[in-house]
Amino acid sequence: MDLSLLERRTDHEWHIAPSGAMRVPGILYASQALVEAMDHKVYQQVCNVATLPGIVQASYAMPDAHWGYGFPIGGVAAFDAEAGGVVSAGGVGFDISCGVRTLHTGLTPGDLEAVKQRLADRLYQDIPAGLGSTGAIRLNHKEMDAMLAGGARWAVERGYGTKADLERTEETGCMPGADPRAVSRKAKDRQREEVGTLGSGNHYLEVQRVEEIFDEEAARSFGLCRDEILVSIHCGSRGLGHQIGTEFLRRMLVAAGAHGITLPDRELACAPLQSDLGREYLGAMRAGINCALANRQVITHLARQAFAAVLPPAELRLLYDVSHNTCKEEVHVVDGVKKRLFVHRKGATRAFGPGHPAVPEALRAAGQPVLIGGSMGTASYILAGTTTGMEQSFASACHGAGRAMSRHAAFRQWKGRQVIDELAARGILVRSPSSRGIAEEAPGAYKDVSAVVDAAHQAGLARKVARLSPVICIKG
Amino acid sequence: MGVRGYGATRNQAFEQAGLALMQVILDPERVEERESIEFQCEAPDDELLLVDWLNALIYAMATRHLLFRRFEVRGEGHGIQARAWGEAIDPARHRPAVEVKGATYTELYVGREADGRWRAQCVVDV
C-alpha cells in the first residue's frame, strides 16, 4: 500500500481522510512494514466500507488485513440502526462464525512424547477432515432447527460436552436471536451430515505447547503455564454458513436499489438493519453462528474421546472459544455516549477489555482471551482484550496471519510430502487427507503471524499473553 | 482462487468455468462419468447467471457427494439448462485438495474478448 495515501497518527495507527462518498475515515492498525506489504485493494476496500449507510466512527483494518470479498479480511465496521445503518452479508463473510477454541489438557510434553504418533493417528481417525468426509451425526428437520437455535448448548444437552464448556464460549454457547426459519432448505441440506467435521482449506485441529509466556498475571488468570500442552480447533459453520452468505448476498444485491443503497462493490451487498431483509439475514446469520458453535463443540467431544483412548490422564478443559466472522449487537461508547451498535468483524476477533460483563468471571480481570491461529509450522498466540482496544476499534483485534501467497502459487512452490517431512524433522506431526492441500497451506504461504501479533500489541488492540508452538496438526 | 472459462459462445465459456471449478478441487481426469444430473438456472444478467451456475454445481457436490468432469450448457438469454457428468466422491481415489464452498462476485466478468471469444470468470471461496 502506498504510504503517501495515509496519515500516520502513531507508530501503529494510520488514517485515511474521508473523500468522495466516504462517510467516515478509514483507520488501519499496523506497523509500517505490514502496511507497506498490504495490497492496494485493502485501501480500496476500507474506503468502500466507509461509504455504507449508518457507519459509525470509522472503517477499520486490523494488522492482518488482506483483500477479501467486499470488506477486507481483518475489517471491522459498526452500524447504527437508528441512523439508517445496514447489515452486510459481505461484511460478515461466507464462513459465518469461523473461529478458534483452545482447550487445556493438563499434560506436559513429557506425557506426550511416547504416544505422539499414536495420538496423531487417533485424532486423524476420529475427527472427520477434508472434502467428502461426513460426521457421525445425521440431523432431521427438528434436530437441525434445534441445533440452529441452540448452538453449543444444543450439543452439550445431547452429551457432547459439559456446562463448563458453555461458560467459556462467547454468548455462553448460544447466540440469541437466531431464526432457523430464515435459513433455507438448501443451507440446511448442506449441513445435514456435516456437524462435527473440520472441513478443508485452512481449518485444523492442532495440539500445541505453550512456548513462552509474555504476561504472567494474565496467563495465571487464563490458567496457562509454560510447557503445558493445549489443543486448538479452527473451523466454522461449514456449508450451511456459506449457503446463507451466498443466498443473502444475492438477495441484498438485487434489493439494494429498492433500499436506496448505492454499492461500490457487489460483495458489499447489504440491507438496512430496520428492513425485513436485514432482520431476516440477522436471524439466519445468528443461526449460522450457532451452527459453528455446535460444530466446534462436537469436535471438542471427539478430541476428548481420542485423548481418552490414548492418554487417559488428559483432561480437556475449554479455555475459550472466539468467533471471527460475525455481526453482533453490542453497546459501545461513541463520543462519550453509550450506543447500541451492530459490529461487523470479518476475519477479526472480538477483544473485550478487562471488566467487561460478557467475559466469564474467572477471566474478566485479565480481559477476554483473543486466540490467534497460526498455520501448521508457525506459532499461535493467546492475547487478552484491552481497555484501549475497547475505545480504538470497537473491541476488535486481529485473527491470524493471513495469506501472503495464493493457493496456486503455493502449490507450484511446495510439494505436500516435502512440507510434511520438513515439519516432522522439527517435531511437528501433520495428518491430512490431501497432499496438495498441505502444499497449498504450507507455512511459507502465510504472512509472519508474530509480526501481526506484535502490531496488535503495539497498537493497543490486545496484549500478548502467550505464544504456542505446534506439535500435532490435523489439517482439513 | 479464481476460475476462468473461455469459449466460442457464452455457454461454452460457462462449461469451461465449470471445469476450472473442478480443477481447484482435483484433477478432473480422475473423475469417471458414471452418472449425470440436470441443472436449471435463471438470473437477471449473465454475470449473476455464472455465479448461480457455479453455486448450483457446488451445492450438488456438497449434498450429493459428487464430483464432475464434463459439462454441457444450453439455453439463451438469462436462463440456462445444463447437464454435468461425474461420480460419487471417493476420497482415497480422488484425493481432493480442498472443498470449494461458494462462487463470489469478486473479479466477476462475463463478456466477449476482442477476438470474439467469450470469457466467464469469478473468484471462488475455499
Image (cartoon, helix red, strand yellow):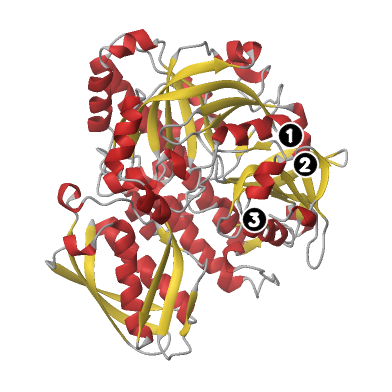
The answer to whether marks 1 and 2 mark residues whose Cβ atoms lie closer than 8 Å is yes
Read off the residue under disc 2. Answer: A13
Q: Tell whether B108 sits left or right of B21.
A: right
Q: Residues within 10 Å of mark 2 (few under 14, many from 20)?
A: many
Q: Tell whether B103 sits left or right of A132.
A: right
Gap between marks 3 and 2, in whole Å?
Answer: 15 Å
Circle 3: residue type: Val
- Above or below residue A20? Residue A121 is above
Task: Determine whether the residue tagged by mark 3 lies in a helix, strand or loop.
Answer: helix
Name the residue at the left extreme: B34
User: Which numbered dot is residue A459?
Assistant: 1
| Residue for point 64% across, 55% down | A42
Q: Residue B67 placed where, x, y %?
A: 23, 61
Chain at numbered mark 1: A
Read off the residue under disc 3. Answer: A42
Chain at numbered mark 3: A
Q: Residue A364 placed where, x, y %?
A: 66, 19
